DNA sequence: GCTTCATATCAGGCTAGACTGATGTATACT
DNA sequence: AGTATACATCAGTCTAGCCTGATATGAAGC
């Protein structure tokens, strides 16, 4: 496996990692239906403020959400293209799994 | 957030977690094009045998792959429905992100 | 200007999980 | 039967990342 291959898989793995935490996935699900401010997310998830803030930071730094500050409040919105890229590659994988031939390569390393 | 909601997000998050490791994602990608035995995966990824075996176990226990033993060799095949379920929910999230209204809920907790 | 509220950051503890060397268990070959 | 090969499991180490209490920042309102 080349270094480039590792890096590509690594970057995408990191994006899947965004959805690999229950609370973070829940936040993404909530933001998928509407723009919300931090206080809503704290309220809806029942998690502590610092914990929600921690996960929002991770999503922010990965480019999965953008923020708009209005007065005291910070509104979070999902950036569609990150999720779209993941959805596309996942659909591709699922299609591949469906078609993956039953023929086996010779096995003599 | 109800306990049920947490559990649902938790289960799906665990599935996304399968793809959140670079090596494991690479293994899934390789299996998406054809059925392979462990020795191929070790060869293609360049990882140690125990490490590959570790990740295959995780994929196996999550139901993401099935195995066929042929003599000394163990062949691994992706089970499409796990990836399909993830692809579907991710597409749904991405669509939601696209349509997510700009209207903001009143913010007065 | 002082207080309050919304949110972010920091520092520390704790746990899950990734990697590895050693070892176990079949199966195949001679 | 004995050896070699393919693969799994075990035990231990180490790191990444989650959670939390304390604290900082910055806007609003009085």
Image (spheres, coloured by chain):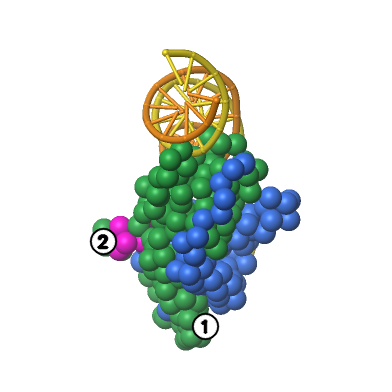
Chain colours: A blue, B green, C orange, D yellow
Q: Is residue B89 above or below residue B11?
A: below
Residue at x 26% of width, y 58% of height: B3
Q: Nearer the viewer, residue A32 or B30?
A: B30
Q: Quadrant of the C terminus of chain B?
A: bottom left
Is residue B88 visible in the rendered image? The answer is yes
In the rendered image, which residue does mark 1 sit on? B98
**Residue B9 belongs to magenta span:** yes
Residue at x 52% of width, y 83% of height: B98
Residue A60 percent location from the top left of the image: 59, 64
**Residue B66 belongs to magenta span:** no
Magenta-drawn stretch, dominant element (helix, strand or loop): helix
Which stretch did the figure color magenta? B4-10
Residue A7 percent location from the top left of the image: 69, 55
Q: Is residue A31 above or below residue C15?
A: below
Is residue A83 visible in the rendered image? The answer is no
Residue farthest toward the right in the current orientation of the protein: A3
Q: Nearer the viewer, residue B81 or B22?
A: B81
Residue A58 position by quadrant: bottom right
Name the element at disc 2.
Answer: helix
Residue A93 percent location from the top left of the image: 52, 66
Q: Quadrant of the N terminus of chain B?
A: bottom left
Q: Nearer the viewer, residue C4 or D12?
A: D12
Name the element at disc 1.
Answer: helix
Residue A66 percent location from the top left of the image: 59, 72
How many numbered marks appear?
2
Q: Chain of mark 2?
A: B
- Indicate which disc residue A41 carries: none
Disc 2 to disc 1, C-alpha distance:
27 Å
State left or right for residue A1 relative to residue A108: right
Residue at x 38% of width, y 66% of height: B81
In the rendered image, which residue does mark 2 sit on? B4
């Amino acid at each position: 496996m080349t270094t480039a291959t590792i890096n590509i898989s690594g970057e995408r793995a990191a994006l899947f990692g965004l959805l690999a935490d229950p609370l973070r996935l829940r936040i993404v699900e909530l933001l998928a239906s509407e723009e919300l401010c931090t206080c809503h997310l704290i309220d809806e998830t029942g998690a502590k403020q610092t914990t929600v803030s921690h996960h929002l930071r991770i999503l922010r730094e990965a480019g999965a959400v953008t923020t708009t500050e209005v007065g005291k409040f910070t509104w979070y919105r999902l950036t569609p293209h990150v999720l779209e890229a993941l959805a596309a590659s996942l659909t591709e994988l699922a299609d591949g799994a469906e078609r993956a031939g039953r023929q086996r390569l010779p096995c003599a390393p």
